[in-house]
Amino acid sequence: METAYFIAVDEFCTRHEIEISLISSLHEAGLIEIKIIQEAEFLNSEELLPLERYIRLYHELNINPEGIDVIKHLLNRINAQHDQIIALRNRLRLYE
Amino acid sequence: MTFIDYYKILGIDKTATTKDVKNAYRKLARKFHPDLNPDDKDAKKNFQQINEANEVLSDPEKRKKYDQYGNDWQHADEFEKQKQYREQSSGSRGARSSGSEYGEDFSDFFESMFGGFSGGRQGRQMKYRGEDYKAEIRLELIDAYKTHQQTITVNGKNIRITIPAGIENGQTIKISGHGSPGVNGGPNGDLYITFSVANHSIFKRLGDHLYATIDLDLYTAVLGGEMILDTLDGQVKLKVKSETQNGSKVKLKGKGFPVYKRDDQFGDLFITWSIKIPTNLTEKQKELFTQLSKS
């Protein structure tokens, strides 16, 4: 079983040199979860990988959180279709 | 090493303003950004090219040098010496740019003209995760039947991994932290291994179930009996009902493929009988069949 770790939002922002408001915007857009522990905000370590991707999209491509949300859904759909293609290919092998 | 036309890469004229460069870069970056094109090597390469073109053309000093020496980059050394002298005189040094996670690999041409790093861009020093590595492992179906360990070499480093039984053809697993080292102190990337499971057995696999068509002699099909069947888990004794029809199926519960990461859970094995009519019958045998047909 994997253990989840929590990273303080302000620590993450300091290390990545980003505004806390960006994290809030991403949270408001439903892209990330923020956990409140003793009145301090934390991020789940499992969210770091997608969060870093959102930050790149925001800074490098000027895409706002709503646009990132659309991209996230489209990429999820592409991945699901990719998995479906693999499953169908495996099924097709039954008849080859 | 060949000359790279950065203007052509961004699709702009030499007269383009800084704003034109920025707009062209943004437009192409949205098209080729690796986060928007996962697993697309061409997109990654294109993104690195446009990133490099932007790095040069959006910086007035670099653009000036490129315009002046671009076609004749071999003579840029002299320019570089003068620049270094100027920098030493003023005491200023360029700072390494954070750049993009995906745009750090500059071409030999770029390195030759501008050195191994960008010197002009100011901004955030992002800590980036290292790039993820991707690898493929080919297995035979029998290998995927049992949990086993395998050592693979990724970028000269040996990694011993455990491959769980029941892995699917095309399935990808993640090995955390075994990708490229992080940038600016960021965490390492991950290693993604995709499995290609070849099947040269008599069994067809669909999910956790196995399917096989087995020949059955006419006499056993008619009278019933027993037969020994080779499965991926050894031999099993199978009872054949009398009057078994051609194409009929039997299910051997729990004799299929292991369920991925579910200890002691297996799919089923489905056998389809293919009844073989005897050939080269003797006169006596034909006579017996005639008698049978008339009975």
Image (cartoon, rainbow, N blue to C red):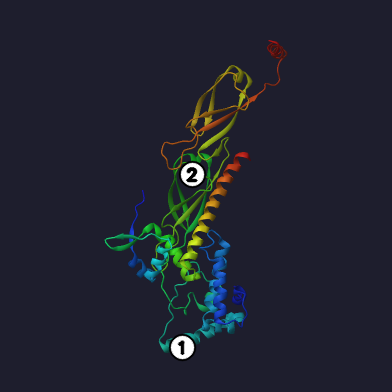
Q: Residue B51 at x, y = what percent?
A: 53, 72
Dot 1: chain letter: B
Residue with the mark numbered 2: B167
Dot 2: chain letter: B
Relative to A42, does residue A82 appear above or below in the rendering?
Answer: above
Disc with the residue nearer the chain's start (1 vs 2): 1
Q: Where residue B86 is drawn, which disc sits there?
A: 1
Residue B16 visible in this rendered orientation of the protein: yes
Q: Residue A10 at x, y = what percent?
A: 33, 67
- In the rendered structure, the answer to whether residue B122 lies left or right of residue B291 reads left
What kind of residue is marked 1?
Arg
Instruction: Please identify the quadrant where the N terminus of chain B is shown.
Output: bottom right
**Extreme-right residue of the structure:** B283
Instruction: Please identify the quadrant where the C terminus of chain B is shown.
Output: top right
Q: Residue B171 at x, y = what percent?
A: 50, 48
Where, by quadrant of the figure, is residue B293 drawn? top right
CA–CA distance in space, label 1 to label 2: 61 Å
- In the rendered structure, the answer to whether residue A23 lies left or right of residue B111 reads left
Relative to A86, does residue B257 appear above or below in the rendering?
Answer: above
Between label 1 and label 2, give the one nearer the viewer. 2
